[in-house]
Image (cartoon, rainbow, N blue to C red):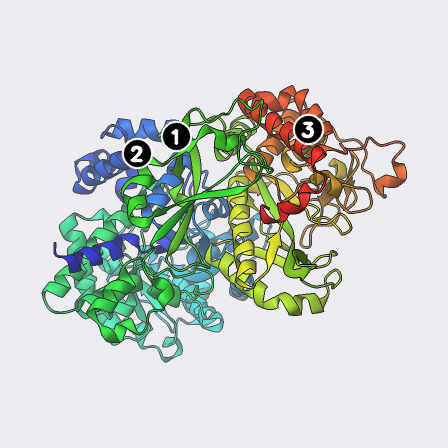
Amino acid sequence: MDKTYAELRRAVETTELVDAHAHNIVALDSTVPFLSCFSEASGKALSFVPSTLNFKRSLRDIAELYGSESSLQGVQEYRSSSGIEKISNMCFKAAGISTLLIDDGFMLEKMLSIEQHSDIVPFVGRILRIEHLAEEILDEGIRNGKSWTLDTFTDSFIGRLKSYAVTVGTKDVAKVVGLKSIAAYRSGLEINTNITRKEAEEGLAEVLLAGNPVRIINKNLIDYIFVHSLEVALLFDWPIQIHTGFGDKDLDLRQANPLHLRNLLEDDRFLDCRIVLLHASYPFSREASYLASIYTQVYLDFGLAVPKLSVHGMISSVKELLELAPLKKVMFSTDGCAFPETFYLGAKRAREVVFSVLRDACNEGDLSIPEALEAVTDIFAENAKMFYKINNAVKSRIPRHVSDTLAKLDNHVKQEFNSTLQDVVLVRVIWVDASGQHRCRVVPQKRFDNFVKENGLGLTCAAMGLTSAMDCPADGTNLTGTGEIRLIPDLSTRCRIPWVMQEEMVLADMHSKPGQVWEYCPRETLRRVSKVLKEEFNLVMNAGFENEFYLLKSCLRDGHEEWVPFDSSRYCATSAFDLASPIFHEVVNALQFLNIDAEQLHAEAGNGQFEIALRYTTCTNAADNLIYAREVIRAVARKHGLLATFVPKYTLDDIGSGSHVHISLSQNGQNVFAASDGASRHGMSRTGEEFMAGVLHHLPSLLAFTAPIPNSYDRIQPNTWSGAYLCWGKENREAPLRTACPPGVADGIVSNFEIKAFDGCANPHLALAAIIASGIDGLRNHLSLPDPIDENPDILRDKLQRLPVSLAESVKALVNDFALESLLGEKLLVAIKGIRKAEIEYYSQNKDAYKKLIHQY
């Protein structure tokens, strides 16, 4: 392969994919047989699947990915032992998929929720299957004793469709980005767009007469539903997917030829409705290509044909699509369904097939190299983003090497690429130590890709024993300059640095040797206790952080540099935001580039103090996001000549900065912290109460993780909204634990609780691990909460226990907290206590030393 095609290969392999048509993943214990991963066959026909080309090729691909025995049994054993979360992350990470658009009408037992899919990829959209929606509406009416007429059904169907148009996509509720029809399965693609009222009424009556559950197979009713769906799609600018070509045995392939759509495509009412023909219309790929070439509204999707066909068949079908169809009209999808492996296989083969097809097109003179490189991003991402109007939801990333190749090969194309898309030169490998300081090693990109990403970087064991005061290990940590660990990059966190050209960053895990996790690793500690919470209670802890920080500017006083507040505005002052607006525009843009959601920002009560709240996510993602968010804020501030500091009390005569964290619990994607009915205590479930009671019980020792330096306790004072007494309250911002009922939650029901005694010096992975460990203890021992405090706790100071007033008191509590030690690990706790005691000793002897912390946190 010459150098030119090597660049094309790299472009194909590194482009992030928008999966324009997919289905839900199911749990490992689903009744769906694993052989269905490889075929559309069902029943007895599945027994012949192992003799298909697709099975033999795909099984080898999966076994290679998992490092398992290359047999069906070996792969299944690996799947069972690893669990759905691990194999999903492996498959999607290897696939490089950034966006899933899920057909919600294909129902499976024990499906993962939208929220769980959102934990795997940055953006999940919903494709609404119109026939399934119609059946769902009719079934609901029958169960409720409703007598359906065509008018009442039409009103309900159109009303439900329109209701989805105003739904804003969130982590829990995916935004509807398009419709889908499976008319090809039910009655064929020869849609009658002029169906009469009488024909529709007769069709509805026939369907209802067939009984419950409803299955709509009457052609007249299907055509009626299709036409009304198109009318709504036009109203809200939704595209529609149409199943064409092959599928399972329910399909009459003769009726799935897209040429049957001529009447629909010629109807003047629907000329502006964007239509995508799924599955390469195989074996009618040439027919589909013809339609896309002559009808403005027709687009093509080659999912299912890739990877279900032979290699020759996949290449042939995609080539046939491109014989006539514009490159701007062809898009990728995996048609992944039920198994994470189907998404990986679809992405892997799509990359290989597209490379082969585009390389041949270049060899034959159909395309120049720059045109082929542009086609890569169009087919894999840009066409789908334009078609489904998801440009604002998913950030396009031009693959590395593409702009440089274009610059060498075509001067005209060179002008269209911004200099920020230059090749990566350096990669920052980042870790956060036990005293909460961000640290990094930087390596050239070539060395990173050729060596470091597999073998890691060497690091002294002493690195996890350092304090905020000096770069040497604290006594009593059992960590010294003897011995070395490996920083192993977590490639799922690798990303371009938004504020520095030609650099990337990646978070690292700590291994005693490659493949063997070190017991002091903060990220692994959080994963380990999260696994206990999942395995014992089937719970996942979610977290969302509020970042408070000061923006300081440098000035000279008596010949000495001092750092003073950026401004002196008050809480939520518009003037403060006006002044800081250019900074926050850059911060929010950088966070969006990193797929980190900022929910709101405002000026805080201190002079020059601001807050940015991040959207909640699973606790492991939340900790990673917090680290990157701090990096963003500090870097953008430096760019503007300012210093951003997260220190709890940068000056003792102003308000302190916290990193309040909101905690919730989910089970199978549903929030189970909130009460399910009005009879629950305090608006939270029994599970939620026990977990929160554990956190309250362990709070004095928890502070050694969430408030880890002596300066932290200058912040935790009465009447400063930081929580100074051992208590909890409902929407009580003077309590260290506050249950919250945010907008959109029913009155009296709480969705989460906030921990206020948490600051920016905490290592977020260790702190969240300690919170989970406390909650697990509460669940194991069925702890109950005391009565809430609904007034300022300081008024009741004679009746309430004060939280530790110093780090020394918190460490003393930790020494006697055997529950935390058993869950977090004895060696790690020894190191933490040693570091904290060194902090106590140093700052007690150097009273003004805290002032230097603004440069470290």
Q: Amino acid at mark 1?
A: Ser
Residue carrying label 1: 82
Secondary structure category for the residue under label 3: helix
Other residues around mark 1 within 10 Å, as few (<14) / some (14–19) / many (≥20): some
Residue at 84% over, 32% down? 800
Residue carrying label 3: 701
Of the pair 549 and 835, the residue shown nearer to us: 835
Tell me if 834 is positioned left or right of 175 in this view: right
| 85 relative to 170, above or below | above
| C-alpha span from label 2 to label 3 | 41 Å
Percent position of residue 74, x then y: 27, 27
In terms of image quadrants, where is residue 218?
A: bottom left
Percent position of residue 32, x then y: 36, 36
Other residues around mark 2 within 10 Å, as few (<14) / some (14–19) / many (≥20): some
Q: Amino acid at mark 2?
A: Tyr
Eye-nearest disc, 1 or 3: 3
Other residues around mark 3 within 10 Å, as few (<14) / some (14–19) / many (≥20): many
Q: Amino acid at mark 3?
A: Ser
| C-alpha span from label 2 to label 1 | 10 Å
Secondary structure category for the residue under label 1: helix
Secondary structure category for the residue under label 2: helix
Residue carrying label 2: 66
Tell me if 233 is positioned left or right of 170 in this view: left
Of the pair 183 and 142, the residue shown nearer to us: 183
| C-alpha span from label 1 to label 3 | 34 Å
Percent position of residue 82, x then y: 39, 30
Marks 2/1 in contact by CB < 8 Å: the verdict is: yes
Eye-nearest disc, 2 or 3: 3
Percent position of residue 700, x then y: 72, 30
Q: Quadrant of the N terminus?
A: bottom left
